């Protein structure tokens, strides 16, 4: 049993016919950490999450979850919960009734299951008795998170949990995930929002065309990133521009939307050259009021790494699992006894064990 990692994958390959969704994927997720999955559409993120939830099986490779080897069956170990492609909800039931029904399926009543507590955690107490059909996308996402919290998972797997969240909803979800990780729960989530991943994740895996192009600590991406554009706001923009022009490794970025005497300038540089510029500014008596990347380091690394892998291969990892080879239709819905009748033309996939 691996006491360090909640997930260990070696050489995982998954195909749908002639399409390679995952190609020799290696993955390690440290217990008690929030691990982000990033990649373009079709990179294989949802397919990989589905494997972790037991919604599909790999064609080859080895997968170990919570110390238990995953066999060639549509099942996963106890302690894993989450959803892909959005949570399945009864639209005609209220938020509280949805959670109560889920608790009943697990042989619990609402009080002992902690229904009111999880509603409070995700910020839905005020709408607990409203029907789910009237919920916004962000509210449905939060209700889905409340549903998996009932399971008290040791591994939580979430597909785009920040979709549709307003600032208040985002604060609730971030707070819940941070507390879970602090209490020892491992979280694996996918997102297209780089700011969310940077705020939440200590580890990140970048997928491109079904392959891992980076996996490790978030700060390890600094070595991958090339030059970045930085916005520099100073007390003397004209003098700052002159100093930047005379600093090796610094290039001023001409932005047609910014006047030459604007309050800030944009420079392109690596970190060492940027440090030298800051020293020069301070020594010249010029106050540095703001220094920030125009594009986050994670996004810059993401673009650099995924562009390198864009070689035109026929790979798709974001396809719907319903009807995929080797899968039981509606597997996740069957596990929770829920189905989203408002979107009955597709099978929502959710797991909570």
Image (cartoon, helix red, strand yellow):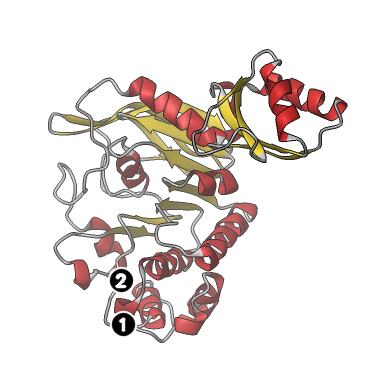
**Is the C-beta separation of discs 1 and 2 under 8 Å?**
yes
Report the front residue among 320 and 265. 265
Q: Secondary structure at mark 1?
A: loop
Report the front residue among 53 and 87. 87
Which of the 4 image quarters holds residue 19? top left
Q: Is residue 204 above or below residue 85?
A: above
Q: Position of residue 122 (x, y in %)?
A: 51, 70
Q: Is residue 295 above or below residue 112?
A: above
Q: Which mark is residue 124?
A: none
Q: Secondary structure at mark 2?
A: loop
- Left or right: 99, with 314 as reference point: right
Q: Position of residue 349 (x, y in %)?
A: 28, 57
Task: Identify the residue position indicated by label 2 in the image.
Answer: 89
Q: Which mark is residue 93?
A: 1
Q: Is residue 213 visible?
A: no
Q: Position of residue 30 (x, y in %)?
A: 56, 39
- Residue at image x 37%, y 78%? 104
Q: CA distance from mark 1 to mark 2?
A: 8 Å
Report the front residue among 20 and 298. 298
- Residue at image x 57%, y 29%? 229
Q: Is residue 18 visible?
A: yes
């Amino acid at each position: 049993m691996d006491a360090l990692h909640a997930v260990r994958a070696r050489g995982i390959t998954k195909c749908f016919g002639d399409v390679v969704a995952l190609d020799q994927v290696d993955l390690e997720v440290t217990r008690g950490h929030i691990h982000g999955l990033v990649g373009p559409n079709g990179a294989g993120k949802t397919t990989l999450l589905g494997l972790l939830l037991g919604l599909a099986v790999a064609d080859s490779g080895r997968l170990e979850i919570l110390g238990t080897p995953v066999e060639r069956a549509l099942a996963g170990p106890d302690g894993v919960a989450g959803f892909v492609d959005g949570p399945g909800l009864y639209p005609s039931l209220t938020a509280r009734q949805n959670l109560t029904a889920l608790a009943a399926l697990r042989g619990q009543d609402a009080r002992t299951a902690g229904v009111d507590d999880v509603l409070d955690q995700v910020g839905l107490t005020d709408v607990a008795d409203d029907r789910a059909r009237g919920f916004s996308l962000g509210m449905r996402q939060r209700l889905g998170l409340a549903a998996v919290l009932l399971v008290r998972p040791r591994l939580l797997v979430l597909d785009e949990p920040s979709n549709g969240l307003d600032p208040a909803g985002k604060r609730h979800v971030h707070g819940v995930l941070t507390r879970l990780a602090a209490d020892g729960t491992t979280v694996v989530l996918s997102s297209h929002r780089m700011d969310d991943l940077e705020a939440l994740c200590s580890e990140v895996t970048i997928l491109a065309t079904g392959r891992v192009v980076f996996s490790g600590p978030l700060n390890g991406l600094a070595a991958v990133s090339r030059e970045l554009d930085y916005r520099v706001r100073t007390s003397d923009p004209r003098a700052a521009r002159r100093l930047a022009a005379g600093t090796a490794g610094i290039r001023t970025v001409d932005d047609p939307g910014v006047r030459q005497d604007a309050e800030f300038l944009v420079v392109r540089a690596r970190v060492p050259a940027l440090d030298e510029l800051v020293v020069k500014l301070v020594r010249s008596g010029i106050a540095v009021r703001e220094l920030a990347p125009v594009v986050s380091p994670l996004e810059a690394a993401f673009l650099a790494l995924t562009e390198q892998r864009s070689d035109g291969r026929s790979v798709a990892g974001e396809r719907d699992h319903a009807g995929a080879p080797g899968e039981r239709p509606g597997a996740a819905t069957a596990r929770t006894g829920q189905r989203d009748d408002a979107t009955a033309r597709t099978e929502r996939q959710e797991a909570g064990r």
